[in-house]
Image (cartoon, rainbow, N blue to C red):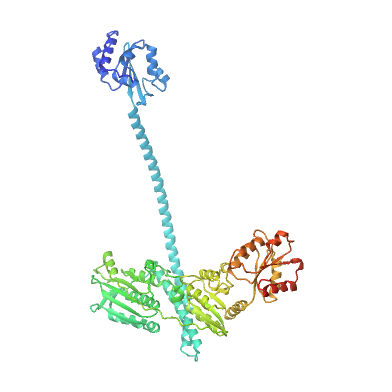
């Protein structure tokens, strides 16, 4: 690298240069020289011929040239050297020649300097060129410009987002108005509907009461039981209507409060009298525990009564044996009472604590059928407690009972209100009670003179109806109240027919059906799906023998179950042929000879049916699209549940030597369609079945 010229060298050159120039019209040499030496801008002074008469240190640094060398260059060389440092040399020449304005920005080629401002200052006989480094200032301007553009962009985005939010708020307002209007219309509809439904319901209940009172004569034991079911169902429906109306009123803000003082002892006595019949029927003990200093309280007495009756009836419903306790005590706030309904029932898993107070929400889909209700009782209770300024919570454990606690502040001016911290402290003080185990089920003793029907159903009323239908018709009924028990009893007792509900606790009907058909012990038992849900396609695809949609008459129910039980003792044959007319012809021939047959119109369908059901024989066509007869044979051979099933190949194909080799074996029998007749086909089928495999 060349050494940068020293200040002393520059001064020496300057002094040498100035002796050659005229000073008559110029400032004194020391004046402009000393001034230029201290400029941060690069300065060069040219004489009239374009030769260098002065350069300062800044010029030497900017143009990377020593002062002595600059002074020794001829005018063209100096001009070329300066011009070479600019990206656009032509612009430099034009500026120097006066064609451009005398103050211009030029792009520079120094690695440390990007932009330079050239300023041309004419003197009397000389020209001063001033070069100012604009790199930092232009970078600053650029960053400011970019920042400004970024701000403008952000501003635009903000304005767009603001417009979107305003639009969203408008849409929300519109939706809110629509929801409010829908709620209003819903409330009106429910109110009108209640009157329409209550009138016939009240008539049903009134007539049921007349019949139960024997006003028109005595009833048989069965008639009495049936009318009680009618009355119970009517009351449940009336309760549902009332619950729906209550929750719709609360949600619409139309539930009015009428608060007043009431005597606690008289109030609790009224509660006990109301639920006493339910307790007596359930065989449960009931006690009320009240702190002695609670004499009066102020709230909406009717709403509190509804809350307690909801909780107590809920406790009775889910407590098969044991006791229920109603506790009333003061909290540390004198004006706030704590109520608790404690039972020894089935309990609630803690994973359901957050959902049991939701409308129409129940812990298990089978709860409605087993215990009754709609899932509205606790939702209404929670809303009423909150309407009265209180808070409700639950403490429970499966098999160890439940405790429903709620606090209720006095509804009068100046009454103390508990904080969230106080409420949580009360929740933590709740204690568990333990319930007794459910009684064991009575043992089942099979009657060899009757056909066994296993009813897998968790609805007690449905079980009663099925038993009523079946037991008087030479059937013996075995009951399982859930899927797991149903599978165990099916394997243990080998019933002639299984009726299966879909919606059950733990395992639903679909899971049970699949498990039954996979079990070699139970796969041949015919299963009839009996459900409110109409999903025949799925039922038959999973192996069901029949699909009965509730409600069904007794005659039809018995007819279909008799058919299934009788078919169980008959030989079952699977017909596999894509020609439906040919398959139906074979089916008619088989049915005329008391065979039970089923048709599969494709190879894939045949494979699925053979895996789910047990057949005594498969009649198989070879020529089928996609999955042909040989593919079906291979699948049957590779499955240990079907590898022993004999196959009668019914074909019009002229078999090749390779085909004949593939059909070699005791299980395989060939019947040419050219020999087809009813007598010959039945003769061949009987021969195969009598010999086990036709050997």
Height in image: 8 above or below 317?
above
Quadrant of the rendered structure where residue 98 is? top left
Question: In screen coordinates, is 367 left or right of 52?
Answer: right
Front residue (pair 153, 516)? 516
The spot of residue 75 in percent (x, y) is: 37, 12
Residue found farthest to the right? 674
Question: In screen coordinates, is 295 left or right of 313?
Answer: left
Q: Is residue 256 visible?
A: no
Front residue (pair 252, 624)? 624
Front residue (pair 446, 295)? 446
Residue found farthest to the bottom? 217
Quadrant of the rendered structure where residue 609 is? bottom right
The spot of residue 29 in percent (x, y) is: 25, 12
Height in image: 135 above or below 390?
above
Total labels: the figure holds: 0
Q: Identify which residue is drawn at 51% across, 68% down.
A: 511
Question: In screen coordinates, is 491 left or right of 340?
Answer: right
Q: Identify which residue is drawn at 50% across, 81% down.
A: 464
Looking at the rendering, in which quadrant would you find the N terminus?
A: top left
Quadrant of the rendered structure where residue 695 is? bottom right
Q: Is residue 658 visible?
A: yes
The spot of residue 512 in percent (x, y) is: 51, 71
The spot of residue 469 in percent (x, y) is: 55, 82
């Amino acid at each position: 690298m060349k050494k940068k010229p020293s200040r002393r060298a520059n001064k020496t050159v300057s002094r040498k240069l100035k002796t050659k120039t005229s000073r008559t019209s110029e400032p004194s040499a020391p004046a402009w020289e000393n001034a230029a030496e201290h400029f941060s801008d690069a300065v060069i002074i040219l004489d009239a011929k374009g030769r260098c008469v002065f350069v300062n240190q800044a010029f030497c640094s900017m143009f990377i040239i020593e002062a002595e060398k600059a002074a020794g260059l001829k005018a063209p060389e100096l001009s070329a050297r300066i011009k070479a440092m600019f990206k656009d040399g032509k612009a430099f020449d034009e500026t120097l020649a006066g064609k451009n304005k005398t103050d211009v920005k030029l792009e520079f080629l120094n690695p440390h300097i990007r932009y330079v401002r050239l300023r041309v200052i004419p003197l009397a006989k000389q020209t001063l060129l001033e070069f100012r480094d604009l790199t930092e200032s232009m970078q600053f301007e650029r960053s400011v410009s970019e920042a400004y553009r970024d701000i403008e962009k952000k501003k635009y985005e903000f304005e767009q987002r603001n417009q979107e939010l305003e639009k969203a708020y408008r849409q929300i307002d519109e939706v809110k108005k629509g929801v409010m209007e829908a709620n209003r219309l819903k409330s009106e509809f429910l109110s009108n509907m209640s009157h329409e439904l209550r009138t016939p319901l009240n008539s049903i209940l009134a007539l049921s009461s007349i019949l139960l009172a024997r006003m028109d004569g005595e009833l048989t034991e069965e008639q009495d039981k049936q009318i009680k079911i009618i009355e119970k169902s009517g009351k449940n429906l009336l309760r549902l209507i009332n619950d729906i109306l209550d929750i719709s009123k609360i949600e619409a803000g139309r539930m009015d409060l009428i608060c007043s003082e009431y005597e606690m002892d008289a109030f609790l006595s009224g509660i006990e009298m109301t639920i006493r019949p339910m307790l007596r029927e359930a065989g449960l003990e009931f006690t009320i525990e009240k702190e002695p200093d609670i004499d009066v309280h102020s709230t909406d007495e009717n709403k509190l009564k509804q809350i307690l009756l909801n909780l107590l009836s809920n406790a009775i419903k889910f407590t098969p044996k044991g006791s229920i306790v109603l506790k009333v005590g003061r909290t540390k706030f004198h004006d706030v009472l704590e109520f608790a309904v404690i039972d020894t029932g089935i309990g609630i898993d803690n994973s359901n604590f957050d959902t049991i107070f939701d409308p129409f929400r129940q812990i298990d889909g089978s709860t409605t059928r087993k215990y009754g209700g709609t899932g509205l009782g606790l939702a209404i209770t929670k809303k009423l407690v909150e309407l009265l300024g209180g808070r409700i919570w639950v403490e429970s454990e499966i098999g160890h009972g439940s405790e429903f606690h709620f606090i209720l502040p006095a509804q009068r001016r100046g009454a103390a209100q508990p904080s969230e911290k106080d409420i949580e402290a009360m929740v933590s003080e709740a204690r568990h009670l333990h319930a007794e185990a459910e009684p064991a089920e009575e043992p089942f003793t099979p009657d060899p003179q009757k056909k066994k029907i296993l009813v897998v159903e968790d609805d007690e009323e449905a079980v009663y109806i099925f038993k009523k239908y079946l037991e008087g018709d030479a059937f013996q009924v075995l009951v399982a109240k859930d899927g797991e028990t149903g599978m165990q009893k099916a394997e243990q007792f080998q019933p002639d027919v299984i009726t299966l509900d879909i919606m059950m606790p733990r395992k639903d009907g679909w899971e049970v059906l699949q498990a039954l058909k996979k079990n070699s012990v139970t796969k041949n038992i015919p299963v009839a799906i009996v459900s409110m849900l109409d999903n025949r396609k799925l039922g038959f695809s999973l192996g069901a023998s029949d699909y009965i949609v509730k409600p069904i008459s007794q005659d039809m129910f018995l007819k279909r179950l008799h058919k299934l039980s009788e078919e169980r003792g008959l030989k079952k044959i699977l017909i596999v042929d894509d020609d439906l007319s040919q398959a139906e012809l074979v089916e008619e021939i088989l049915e005329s000879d008391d065979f039970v047959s089923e048709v599969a119109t494709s190879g894939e369908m045949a494979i699925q049916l053979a895996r789910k059901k047990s057949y005594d024989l498969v009649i198989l066509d070879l020529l089928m699209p996609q999955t042909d007869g040989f593919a079906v044979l291979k699948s049957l051979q590779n499955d240990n549940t079907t590898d022993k099933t004999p196959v009668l190949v019914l074909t019009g194909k002229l078999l090749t030597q390779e085909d004949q080799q593939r059909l070699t074996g005791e299980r395989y029998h060939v019947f040419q369609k050219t020999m087809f007749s009813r007598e010959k086909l039945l003769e061949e089928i009987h021969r195969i079945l009598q010999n086990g495999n036709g050997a």
